[in-house]
Amino acid sequence: MKIRRAEEKDIPRIDELLNQVLEIHAEIRPDIFISGTRKYTDDELKKILNDEKTPVFAAVDENDVLKGYAFCVMEDTSGSNNLVPQKSLYIDDLCVDEKARGMHVGRILYDYVINYAKDEGCACVTLNVWEGNDSARAFYDKMGFTVRKTVMEKKL
């Protein structure tokens, strides 16, 4: 498995994996996520892929077929009035193709993201996990993530 920056040629596979993630979330929270929809249009993906502040890392096999990705966002609080100035890397979305799960693709992507963040001088890596996505939560717990803040809701 090799990690590289995702490219526009990867958009069809990225769309497939984005759909896999969306369907997991739609099953868990159909009151929030709409099954069969898309998180990004292809034009939005092109913009993300070409923006240095939103690196997308692709895990590809020996045939350069995308098996997983990590959408990231570089964050910087140096312009804030009340937050300590620091850079952090936010993992907006990390997905491993359901056919490649159990092959350590997630771990390889995770290690790459952590090393990238260190090389960029980040103080931490952050992400959100939806309640009910127990396998994702277990993976991030195993990787050493801890709760930074909790978002709560009161359904009406």
Image: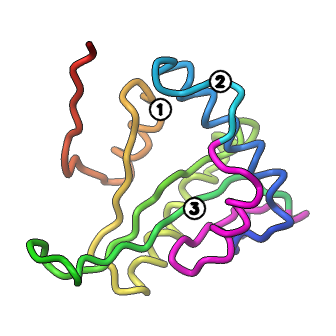
Label 3: state its secondary structure: helix
Report the disc number at residue 109.
3
**SS at mark 2 in the image:** loop
Q: Compare residues 45 and 59 and report the one nearer the observer.
A: 45
Q: Which residues are magenta?
A: 39-64
The C terminus lies in quadrant: top left
Determine which of the numbered discs, if any, sits on residue 135 in the image: 1
Point out the residue furthest to the left here. Answer: 82
Q: In this orientation, which residue lies closer to the viewer: 149 or 63? A: 149
- In this view, the residue in front, 77 or 56, is 77
Q: CA distance from mark 1 to mark 2?
A: 20 Å
Labels 1 and 3: the sequence-earlier one = 3
Q: Nearer the viewer, residue 15 or 57?
A: 15
Q: Amino acid at mark 2?
A: Ser
Label number found at residue 35: 2
Asked if the stretch drawn in magenta spans residue 60, the answer is yes
Sequence order check, earlier mark of 3 and 2? 2
Contact (CB < 8 A) between labels 1 and 2? no
**Label 1 sits on what residue type?**
Ser
Q: Secondary structure at mark 1?
A: helix
Q: Position of residue 150 (x, y in %)?
A: 20, 40
Q: Position of residue 153 (x, y in %)?
A: 23, 26
Quarter where residue 36 is shown:
top right
Q: CA distance from mark 3 to mark 2?
A: 26 Å
Callout 2 environment at 10 Å: few (<14), some (14 to 19), or many (20+)? some
Q: Quadrant of the N terminus?
A: bottom right
- Labels 3 & 2 near each other (Cβ < 8 A): no
* 72 lies above or below 39: below
Residue 109: x %, y % from top left = 57, 61
